[in-house]
Image (spheres, rainbow, N blue to C red):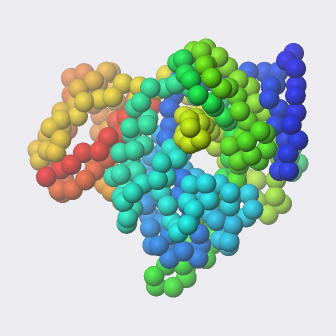
Amino acid sequence: MKLLVTILAIFGSITISFSQSLNVPKQKKALFVKATATWCTPCGEYLWVSDSIHNAYHDSIVFINAHVSSSSIGDPYSGDFHNAFGGGGIPKYVVDATQMVSWPPSVGEILDSSSAHINSTIVANIAFKSTINGNSLTVNTTTEFFEDATDTFYVNVFIVENHVTSMQTVVSGVISVDQERVSRGPIMGGDSGMWGEQIATGNVLAGDRFDVSFTTALNSAWNTANLEIVAVIWHKNDGVYTTLNCEDQDGATVSMVENATSTKLNIYPNPSSTLLNIDGVEGEQEFKLVDMFGKIVMFGSLSNAKKSISLDGISKGNYIIKIINSKGGNVQKVVIE
């Protein structure tokens, strides 16, 4: 039995070790955060950006809809998180704590940044199991490092709520919308407040594991049936926090197969007007060609015998190709001309 040390905080408690480590898959996902508000007209006009990404890429891109405290569906729990990435005017679109520069928001830029993160080295990952008992939520997490690393690392868990109906301002007025992944804030506490609990600083070795348990009381206004958890590993370097990895699937359901995105596929020619060739296909794989609005315009299968995709009938423009097998997904941007 491991020693239990509990740190009490305003919003909850953190246990820096618990008795049962979780299995951690060698996988990687990107964290996509929208800093937003229900009273913000541009936020309402560009709901389709975050919605299309979440709907089309939820298995590889983890979305958090971070409303400012003054938003009609915001609350004190989400405001600090919103301000950490948004600040000043809104909306802001952020991938792995780095703000997208394009405005109006570019789906392609968001997906490019997400793909770059997903296809980079998997340094560490986090697994979690959550339990609700009455109005108390407990989330046990295990972080495992797969590579040697240096700097300071934190973990925290975030609560999000789906199917939150709100009145949203748009150019034409105010409309009723159903918002997904509304931030209910991180479970505050530990030695870094919003960023959670420091698990390591200095040199970390491949194979090192860190267990942290979070407990908090749930707001009675939240629909517990629509709540989800997002667990995040933060990398702090020179005072700047970035996302090392994240997970939104409970340890009971997440795949333990190693992430296929650790090997990037070579897709060429790109741009192309007739055919896409794909190097690196192993075994049977599915593909989807998705436009910038998240609409699937073509789907099919690839194999060792079929490693190309005909573009007959596909309109010119920017697209995302997503190639999927039992190990995960590979997301890349392609241009059809």
Location of residue 191 (image quadrant): top right
Would residue 180 be visible to someone looking at this image? no
Q: Position of residue 197 (x, y in %)?
A: 73, 36
Location of residue 156 (image quadrant): top right
Would residue 122 be visible to someone looking at this image? yes
Q: Position of residue 222 (x, y in %)?
A: 76, 60
The answer to whether 311 appears left or right of 232 in the picture is left
Location of residue 78 (image quadrant): bottom right
Identified at 18% across, 50% down, the residue is 336
Most extreme residue toward the front, as rendered?
A: 238
Identified at 35% across, 45% down, the residue is 112
Residue 93 or 141: which is nearer the viewer?
93
Identified at 64% across, 43% down, the residue is 230
Decide: is 324 above or below 77. Answer: above
Give the quarter of the figure containing the N terminus.
Answer: top right
Residue 235 or 34: which is nearer the viewer?
235
Q: Position of residue 105 (x, y in %)?
A: 39, 62
Decide: is 325 above or below 318. Answer: above
Most extreme residue toward the bottom, as rendered?
A: 173
Residue 318 or 104: which is nearer the viewer?
104
Identified at 88% across, 41% down, the residue is 8
- Give the total of numbered labels: 0
Q: Position of residue 53 (x, y in %)?
A: 44, 53
